[in-house]
Amino acid sequence: MKYILVSGGVISGIGKGIFASSLGVLLKTIGLKVTAIKIDPYMNIDAGTMSPIEHGEVFVLNDGGEVDLDLGNYERFLDVTLTRDNNITTGKIYQQVIQKERKGEYLGKTVQVVPHITDAIQEWIERVAMVSVDHSGEKPDVCIIELGGTVGDIESAPFVEAMRQFQFRVGHANFALAHVSLVPVIGPVGEQKTKPTQTTIRELRALGLSPDLIACRCYKALEPEVRAKISMFCHVGKEQVISVRDVLSTYHVPLLLKEQGVLSFFQKRLGLDTIHISADQLIKSESILKKWTKLTEDHDRLKKSVTIVLVGKYTNLQDSYLSVIKALEHSGLKCERKLTLMWVEASELEHEFEKVNPDKYREAWNVLSSANGILVPGGFGNRGTEGKVAAAKWAREKKVPYLGICLGLQVAVIEFARNVCGLSDANSEEFEPHSKHKIVINMPEVSLTHLGGTMRLGMRSTIFKDDTEKWSITRKLYEVTGFMAVGKQSIEERHRHRYEVNPTYISKLEEKGMHFVGRDEKGERMEIMELKDHPFFVGTQYHPEYLSRPLNPSPPFLGFVMASAGLSLDTIFHE
Ligand code: GLN
């Protein structure tokens, strides 16, 4: 097993995750099987209880793990399926060590950060790196370990120390380090400054780690003399300093790295050519680079655009809805449409808000009414829900394509119950526990006292109803995209919710034209909702965005973008 550690310096949020996943793509182009581990040095056990405002979206895995959004980047870029153990946090490591201590497994020893925490980290990495991440069932060849935060932080110190020990544990030939740094541009002539990089590398070395590669983030390419200076002051060869400039899309990054010899560098440094690659694996890998190149070209060539309005709660932070945006982007590419994403803060669509700030209220409605398609993503808590209900009403009545995800499905059902079925006080138990018509109710099996990891989480089946074959657009989309195998009637998608549509109201809703075309195995839990006499009005209780891939967009998203762009299935799947 070969390990590549990706650490970061100067500031966080400069694209370490994209660099690491792009590196993974390059390794896959030569037939290697690649896995990834993300280390988050915070104390939380997982990202499940963290606010999307502070930390970006919570990404959900097949096994129900609620993890850092970088795992989403890895799954999308590397086309792999990861587990909750691929995300290590300080909380998880401490929990494990403390449990062991309580069981008396340390045999009377004093339990300490070094060696017990650092050992636990190394053992965890070695164990998880071996787990197969694709259908082959074979263990990966290379594991990329991304260390979150910046080197030198107090909270990442045990992980840095663990990695220092790890390089000797697995041997120099099996361990390499890439450090991502920032090169700011300062002054009227736009000088690229190397001092922050020098400082972070000095800090790294002081902690016992030497970089094999320094990846410099800068909005423009590094000047040759800047590269030479970094090489000189950071004690590495010039070929070990690479420049990661801003590019049009993240899809360009693997190619940008390849151009600068990053792949051949690691091939030599880690002796990757000696790894046996099966004929099957080699065939599969051959097309990866071609596909990736085509993806970037297609992306850059897009001219026509489609305007999607996202009605959400954290609309000032793109990261809060990262997978949703990616899934829209993937679908845009397939429909040959550039994605114009507009944001509406849900609460600004509410009548109450009109009294507070009529101008902003009008502006929010102007944006909503300019949409080719309206998307209401997942969410929690009361704030903004009435605005989302209003957005669903607008989409239904004005026949604007609508995609509701999780909460987005729930608000669409509430709106329909109120305005079509005449249940004027219909609501969700989450927002109005005493409403007469609880259209959305708490699921019996979830915990009411604990928030962490207690929802209906992860991969579950949805079965399409028998009579939907002829007319359900969602079913058709799952079929044509290959997400549902030929002859099958069920799909698997990832969930994260605590509430569900109340089964006692289903016949009433269906009578009026809201169809629940997909349900769980028992037929009691509503998974997919569709309106028939509408260009596209679909809601899913699950989160289809998590399984979307650049070259294989999620079916509900594809259908939504397609309808928003005024395209039909035949025009897209003409081949
Ligand atoms: N708050 C809703 C629930 O718990 C929706 C959750 C979501 O959108 N992920 O069911």
Image (tube, grey):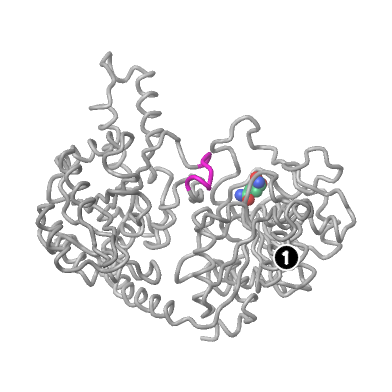
Range of residues picked out in magenta: 48-55
Front-most of 543 and 350?
Answer: 350
> Which residue is at a point 23% across and 58% down the rendered structure image?
193
Total marks in image: 1
Residue that protrudes farthest toward the top in the picture: 108
Is the residue 420 above or below the residue 435 in the image? Answer: below
Ligand 1 contact, mark 1 (Cβ < 8 Å): no
| Main SS class of the magenta portion in the image | helix
Residue 465 is at least partly visible in this image: no
Residue that protrudes farthest toward the right in the picture: 422
Which SS class for mark 1? strand
Residue 430 image offset from top left, x and y in percent: 72, 42
Residue identifier under label 1? 530
Is the residue 121 above or below the residue 5 in the image? Answer: above
Residue 420 image offset from top left, x and y in percent: 86, 61
**Quadrant housing residue 354:** bottom right
Q: In the image, what residue type sits under mark 1?
A: Glu
Is the residue 282 above or below the residue 336 in the image? Answer: above
Front-most of 193 and 322?
Answer: 193
Residue 49 drawn in magenta:
yes
Residue 52 drawn in magenta:
yes
| Local crowd size for mark 1, using a 10 Å CA cut-off: few (<14), some (14–19), many (≥20) | many
Front-most of 329 and 14?
Answer: 14
Residue 363 image offset from top left, x and y in percent: 69, 64
Residue 381 is at least partly visible in this image: yes
Residue 217 image offset from top left, x and y in percent: 29, 60
Front-most of 132 and 549?
Answer: 549
> Which residue is at a point 78% across and 38% down the rendered structure image?
433
